[in-house]
Amino acid sequence: MSQGRPPRLTVLRLGHRRERDKRITSHLGLTARAFGANEVVLAGEEDPSPLKTWKSVTDRFGGDFVGKYEGKPMSWLRRASKSDDFTIVHLTMYGQPWRQTIGKIPVNKPVIVVVGGTKVPFEAFQVSDFNVSVGNQPHSEVAALAVFLESWLGPIDEDSIFSGAQMKVIPSDRKKVVIPTEEE
Ligand code: SAM
């Protein structure tokens, strides 16, 4: 686990397909949010649906999290890479093992984590500072992102990250307990 957190953590979701990836892209954004990202940049087919879901969850459960669409993600990523203002981490089954890599990722500037959907352009490998695998077997972008973020940043402080929530879940052994936050 690294020391501290980057000032801003963005997940770039490449190659979204409106029909086929509806649920997984929605889950990817919710996972990014739950594990401490500030933003998801959606690329591929334009689709308001995941953006609406992420906003609705953020409105209810708090936090400073935004989703937005980017029509030219590789130009966007190239610019970020050239500016040297960001660290770019690409999650790919072909990359270097995550446990050996997370300690090398700096947290002194914003980080962009790139995950794919359909075939990822080769340029993503070239513009990234780190190509990181969560095992060298093919699996899911949601699983890769969750394992990577939890391993790299550790547990998040929910109360500070999800401030401004309308409601909060109280952990329970046997039932659903959700309270409006002003009752705390
Ligand atoms: N077919 C695509 C390709 O050839 O690039 C990859 C599809 S995979 C279902 C979708 C995304 O999940 C990948 O782009 C990568 O970001 C992530 N992923 C899948 N397996 C991974 C692994 N073992 N380690 C890291 N990321 C992984």
Image: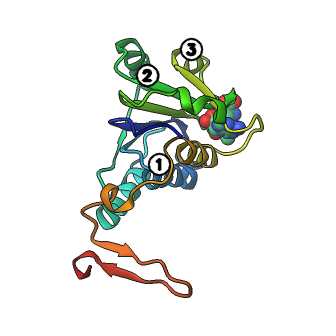
Identify residue for label 2.
77
Task: Name the residue: 47% across, 25% down.
Answer: 88
In this view, 124 is above or below 5:
above
Q: Give the x, y percent position of residue 174.
A: 56, 87
Task: Name the kind of residue labelled 2 in the image.
Answer: Leu
Mark 1: few, some, or many residues within 10 Å (few <14, many ≥20)? many
Residue that label 1 marks? 32
Q: In which quarter of the image is residue 158?
A: bottom left
Q: Is mark 2 on a helix, strand or loop?
A: helix
Q: Which residue lies furthest to the right in this view?
A: 137
Residue 72 in the image: state x and y as whole percent.
Answer: 41, 25
Q: Give left or right: position of 98 versus 80.
A: right
Instruction: Determine which quarter of the picture holds residue 46.
Output: top left
Q: Which residue is drawn at 43% across and 54% down?
A: 156
Note whether ligand 1 is within 8 Å of mark 2: no
Query: Tag 3: residue type?
Result: Gln
Is residue 19 toward the left or the right of residue 100 in the image?
left
| Cα–Cα span, label 2 and label 3 | 11 Å
Query: Could you say which is closer to the camera, residue 23 or residue 57?
Result: 57
Q: Where is residue 123, by image quadrant? A: top right
Regarding ligand 1, which quadrant of the image does it lie in?
top right
Disc 2 residue crowd, few under 14, some 14–19, many 20+, Cα 10 Å? many
Q: Name the residue under label 3.
A: 126
